[in-house]
Image: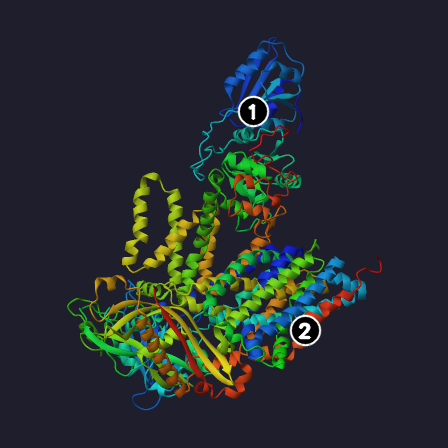
Amino acid sequence: MERIKVRQLCFYFVAMMPVAKLLVYPATLTYQSKNDLLLSAFVNCLAEGAIVALVMLLAKKSGKSLFALLENTFGNITAKIVYGVFALFFFASALLPFMEHKNFVLQVMYENVPSIISFAPFFFVCFFACVKGFKSIGRMADISLPIFIVAFAVLILLAFPHADFAALLPLQGASAGEVLRGSLFSANWYTEAAFLLFFLGHFEYEKRASVKVIASYAIGSAAVLLFLAVFYGVFSDIAIRQQNAVAQISKYTTSFTSLGRVDYLFIFAIALVMIFRLCVPAQMCVHCLCKSFGCKPMLPAAAVNILLLALTVFFNYSFLELQTLFTQRLWFLFALFAYALPAAALLLKRRGAHE
Amino acid sequence: MNKLWTSIFLTAAAVLLLLFFSNDFGLIDIQETAIVVAIGIDTAEEGEGYDVTAQIAVPSSTGSGSAGNVTVKNAQTVGEAISELNHETGWYPTLVHCKLILLGEAVTETDVFRVLDYFLRNDAVEDSCLVAACAGTARETLQAQSPVNDISASAIAKVLSSEAQETGLVSVTILKDFAIGYYSVGKSGFLPYISVQGEAESQGGGGAAPTAEIDAAEECAWLPSLKRNRWWKPKRQPLPIAAPVSSESGSQGGADSGASGKSGSADVFQASETMLFYEGKQVALLSPEETLAYNLAATDTDFAYGSVTAEQDGQETVYNLKMKIGKKKRSLTFENGMPVFTFTVRANARLADTDRASAILEVAKTQIADDAILRAAEKKFEQELSSAISKAAAAGCDLFGIKQRLYRYRYREYAAFQDSVLTAAQVHYDIRFTSLK
Amino acid sequence: MKKLGNTCKENVAALKGILTSEDILVFAFETQDGAACAAIYADGITDKALLGEQVARPLSREKTPKTAQEAAKILQAPETKTETDPLKIADEVLAGNTALLIDGVAEAVIIGMKKLSMRAIMEPPGAIAVKGPREGFIEDLKTNMSLVRNRLRTPKLQFKTLTAGKQSKTAIAVGYLDGIADEEIVKKIVDKIECIEIDGIPDSSYVAKFLAERPNSLFKPTGTTEKPDVLAAKMLEGRVAILVDGSPIALTLPYLLVEDFQGAQDYFVSPYRASISRLLRFFGVFVSVFLPAMYVAAQLFKLQILPLSFLLTISGSVQGIPLSPSLELFFLLLVLEILIEASVRMPKYVALALSVIGALVLGDTAVKAGLVSSSAIIIMALSGISAYTVPDLVGTTSILRLAFVVVAGSIGTFGVLLMTALVLYYLVTADAYGVPLLAPFSPLIRRDLKDSLLKTSMYGLDKRPKVLQSKNKTRLRNKGGKVNHGKN
């Protein structure tokens, strides 16, 4: 149940990684970095790419899981504690994307914003996914790739004619401080390296796996940067207002055709991939809890999803405050868990005392 | 484990079926939905606030075009007017298919974003809708009857279509672009200026646009509708629906519904003038020739028809040219520390018509325009363009994006020239018309 | 149970004590030297002419054999075996064989003499082929095995014959190609069949349920086919076939969902035509499942999906309809299912009259009466017809379609997406016999994609499907053009 292939990791980075950054991230980044948003995003992509490379290097040197490495270095109890802490991190990192997605769904897929009961069934799907384990992440990546490629390509092609890339000028229109702030305050959207850390030991390192994974990450990042460029080209001075970017950029081509908003089909396809991506942090959280407590996934999956539902309802009217908290106050925690700790994993002992 | 999953699924199925059959979780029944296709905003005739007119498409089994107008008067904000629409008629207005926002002339005298930002805030309204200003009131414009029996919003949308934009005769803008202009460094924008002109009488057929005012209860023909699921919320006022079409009644069908349009005549929409805006207020109006020149030089217009007078054989002759733009470019440079704005236009022109009878050989060589005609066309184009630029500059409107170019491409000089670049920039014209030889 | 004795009379009495039915007959005769012989058989399923020719006549002309083996040599029957357990002898008699008892011999000779009235081999109605073979399986296991044997004339073709069903004692044959099929899967299937404890197995679908690793799944647990050429092709790919006596439907394992989109005819026409057909089938299933749901969701939750002119048409057509769009479509789909169910069962002589009523009920009359809208009828009809592009999945498709409509009517477009995600999560993790159900899409197996939704030419299918983990990977060695004088 817990095996994943290198090919599936690559597909994850190409197809599932970018979708998390297509909703609120562009508008939020515009707020911080204005027309230099590409620069901020590039910094984040570079940093995360470096961490991904380091984690793959660790995978190459040792075929063991993070738990085994921690156990070799610190012992079983400490390993469980670390997993427990990461479980908390994954739980926290799942909350904001859930809220974003909830807003996206309630605004884009409904005429009048219905009650949160329309979003609640998502947690059932997430619960089901959590029970299924890593294998489902890998297999969903296989399914997501063609869907994402087709949908993303169509949306970008529809948006392209209306994008004025000159709006990205002037370069350094925003100050270095603003660009840096944009990067730092986006840390919560860049947690893939932490996921990769936990995939260690669950995939077989094959020839040139590092190259493949890093190349895939680069492709995924390029897709994000392209989207940001097109997004800002389309909206420029009103970009800050476009909360659900992926649903907005392509409508200017389709609005006046007799077929109407055909781009909705592709937006729904991207939304489907988003569902798969959204479940990943919760699946990680459940995986960590199972390792910590040595139990089957059913109970932790139920607990995690019920808690997430409760928090989503609780924060239903506090999205802005939650976002400010996570992005502007707690960014260092994301940087720690998603950048620093995965990099530090290279220092763990690869061989146990008994080996 | 299987029993647990079975129980979970059965519970989920039961909940879903309950939701399905109760059908009441904020759903809007399509039969109670008013599909608003256009919104007109005027300053209140009496008192303060706005008069907001919603043109509501009337469904029919054949999907033919007819609509009803509902006006809410004296609303403090557009949002209040939309809510009032729901409250008074019992119909839920949906703005997702609103394709036109029409601003009355009086509204454009103040910052139009006092009314337009409702549409930017509202996620239900797409910012891809057309925006236009009109002569007189938007309400009267929306009441106009198109000679082809289109609803007025559709007729206006046709006039402002992308095809029309490509001919250069109208300057089309959507809410998004207008908002970008407003919020950009230039704080400028433009809207097509629509005027209604009465034409010949229509030859029968209904399709009238009846209007129902909230404070005047009119009796309207309405289809029987069976209440469904919402028996506890009876409709308060039926939606005005056009009376059945009959060849004898012609526009009389409209009268049954309280139409106040011109009886027996069709109206044609003109949109060849362009209203310029700065900081949301209208500051100038471009003539049709200036509009054409602007479109040829600065927008997506690829080809256009234009008339030019040239002397031929000692006679002043009016030539109608078909112009195909090959290249157009605007650039901002600095010479001796001063901004220079250059228009570069390359176009191919051919004769479409003249005002005198021509010899058969001339007709055969219609694709070839004489140098004199081409030079006259260049001169006229330059004149109109210059006139448009001057008008815009005098009003502070960054119509041609000079200030924006200064900000994007010459950021270092932006601080020094941001307030004066429109008037200080020297404008150079590099316009060349060619023809087949 | 006590074994057989030496005297014929005793043995006959013992067997008649077990086989008490009046259609179990005893044919008594003597050998040349006067020893009593008795042939016990079931009337109606035994070839009595053969009984006389191959059993009675030779024995009556010979001296009394001392042993059952000696007796078997005298007989002119190709299928003989000996048995001493009366219960097993009884089973053989009930299976259509004849039990020969001879005075002085403590064993019975079981002679294969089954003669059943069977239907002719004909094209199965559910798998009509414009091109290709027209044979179909029938209810007799031996005939079905012969049809397969006729297509795979290799010593590697193995059949393991098992029996299941306490009362029905149904014969089941597990067929596979030695060296091609995965032996572990064969063993697993055999073990599962041997563990079946049920009174009767009337059809192969019962066996399918026992073989299923997820018995409560909405999706089929095994592949099915009624055609020997299809079964042979699947066995050549590495699958295991299960033939059940009394059922014309053969089962295959492991099962992939994509199999149902592959028609037999795809391999007899050009690959381009085959690819188009498969894409059409996929599109058909997609339309069948999603179109009604999206129609409901768009009307109830997101009008913007519909173009304005279409929206006005729909809005006009639903004026005065008493039901909401979701209920309207739900009941229309229900009526469709009722019509389909009734058309399968109705006598042929009333089919015409009832079909007219069905057309009227759902057609113009219902619209004119204002009960349903015309657009809903079109959606329902399209959906219903599209489902039959893949007849094997019709059962699953209809249930999914109704489920999606319910979800769309209650939660909306997001509900449709969630349901899709749920179904996909289920399918991607539904491995059976070590083979993922959604292969070769998930997990992605590039080599196997050549014969999935698109089909490459015959030369492109030189390797067996990787997902079936066959030891012998190559199935096409010589791509033609060169004569191969070497070994095969």
Counting labels gives 2
Kindly identify the residue that appears in the image at 65 percent across and 23 percent down: C4
Q: Chain of mark 1?
A: C
How far apart, in angstroms, are the residues tagged by discs 2 and 1?
80 Å
Which numbered tag is attached to residue B315?
A: none
Asked whether residue A115 is in view, the answer is: no
Q: Secondary structure at mark 2?
A: helix
Q: Which secondary structure, mark 1? A: loop
In this view, the residue in front, A140 or C476, is C476
Q: Is residue B110 above or below residue C99?
A: below
Can residue A220 be seen in this snapshot?
yes
Instruction: Tell me: residue A171, above or below residue C258.
Output: below
Crowdedness near tag 1: few (<14), some (14–19) or many (≥20) residues, C-alpha within 10 Å: many
Q: Amino acid at mark 2?
A: Ala
Residue A57 drawn above or below residue A340: above
The residue positioned 54% from the left and 26% from the top of the image is C96
- In the rendered image, the residue lying farthest to the right is A354
How far from the left and from the top, in percent, is residue C62?
Answer: 61, 9
Instruction: Give whichever of B346, C4 is nearer the camera.
Output: B346
**Tag 2 residue:** A335
Mark 1 = which residue? C97
Q: Quadrant of residue C189?
A: top right
Residue most extreme to the left = B248
Q: Position of residue C468 (x, y in %)?
A: 61, 43
